[in-house]
Amino acid sequence: MQQRVAAHPEKVTARQGMVDHPLGPMQRGMDQGYFLTRGLGKVRGEMRLTILGSQLTSVRNILGVEALLTAGV
């Protein structure tokens, strides 16, 4: 591992910048607050929607709105 890191330090730097936010701040940042549903299955679904929204926001910030619209997403 040390040899691979030493051979390509730029990959390590790029990977360090791709960390997702923890779940609590992600919810607060999207003005979601607490879970609105009850039960493990429903909370999982709600959390998946929150993560999907967060990922789409990240993609929009990286690529831009025009690229998303032309991609047909």
Image (spheres, rainbow, N blue to C red):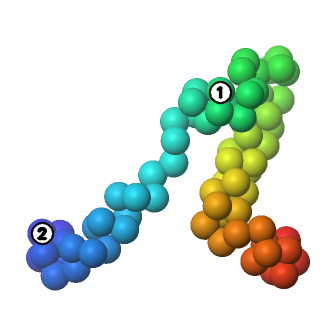
> Which residue lies under the disc numbered 1?
28
Q: Quadrant of residue 55?
A: bottom right
Q: Earlier in the sequence, mark 2 or mark 1?
A: 2
Amino acid type of the residue that numbered disc 2 sits on in the rendered structure? Gln
Residue at left 65%, top 27%? 28
Image spot of residue 7 (x, y percent): 16, 82
Q: Name the residue that disc number 2 marks.
A: 2
Say whether residue 48 is visible.
no
Q: Quadrant of the C terminus?
A: bottom right
* Quarter-of-image position of residue 46: top right
* Element on which disc 1 rests: helix
Nearer the observer: mark 2 or 1; the answer is 1
Relative to 21, residue 60 above or below? below
Could you tell me how far apart the alpha carbons at marks 2 and 1 are, in whole angstroms? 38 Å
Label 2 packing within 10 angstroms: few (<14), some (14-19), many (20+)? few
Number of numbered markers: 2
Residue at 12 percent of width and 69 percent of height: 2
